[in-house]
Image: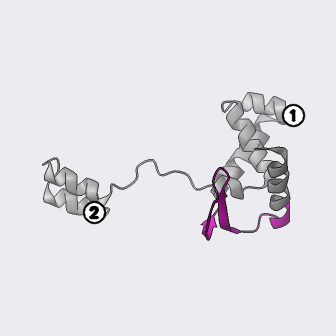
Amino acid sequence: MDGTRKQDWQALTELTQGRPMVVERVRLTDRDIAIEGAFELPKLAQLAAEDQVFVAAFVRSHGSIKEMEQVFGVSYPTVKARLNRIAGQLELVEINPAPSRSEVLERLKAGEITADQAVAELEGRK
C-alpha cells in the first residue's frame, strides 16, 4: 500500500470515528473495472486505527505477549485486556461449520451415513 492510500485510509477511519459504514464502489486497480453494490468491510477493517496497529503488531510478534509488552511499554495484564477487548469486537471463525447440503447428500449417497443421520445433520442436530 503506498503512502497516499495509507493516509486516505487513516483519514477515512478518523472521519467515521468507528461508526458503521458501507463501501458502495470497488475498483480493481490493475484493470478498468469497477463494481458497485453494498459491501460491508471486514471486521478487522472496522476496528479503530490504533486497534488495527495493535493487531498487526501482535501478528508480527507471532503472538508474543512478552514482545508486545516491550513494544508498547505496557504490562502483561494490559496487553491481555486489550486483546480481549479487540477479540470481543471480532466475529470469530466457526471452527466446526455445519456441512453443506451437498456434502451431507454426498456422504449419504456414498453410504457413509444413514438417512436419519443425514436428516439430523441437515436440521443442525448432528
> What residue is at 70 percent from the left and 51 percent from the top?
86
Is label 2 in a helix, a strand or a loop? helix
- The amino acid type found where label 1 is placed reads Gly
Of callouts 1 and 2, the N-terminal one: 1
> What residue is at 81 percent from the left and 49 percent from the top?
6
Outermost residue on the front side: it is 32
Residue 120 marker? none
Q: Which residues make up the magenta segment?
A: 14-41
Percent position of residue 2, x then y: 80, 44
Few, some or many residues within 10 Å of mark 1 (<14, 14–19, 20+): few
Percent position of residue 11, x then y: 85, 58
Mark in front: 1 vs 2 = 2
Percent position of residue 79, x then y: 76, 40
Residue 81 appears in the picture as rendered = no
Q: Is residue 24 magenta?
A: yes
- The amino acid type found where label 2 is placed reads Leu
Determine whether, in the image, residue 70 is placed left or right of residue 118. right
Q: Is residue 43 magenta?
A: no
Report the residue marked by disc 1.
73
Report the residue marked by disc 2.
122
Q: Residue 104's image quarter?
A: bottom left
> Quick one: quadrant of the N terminus?
top right
> Quick one: quadrant of the C terminus?
bottom left
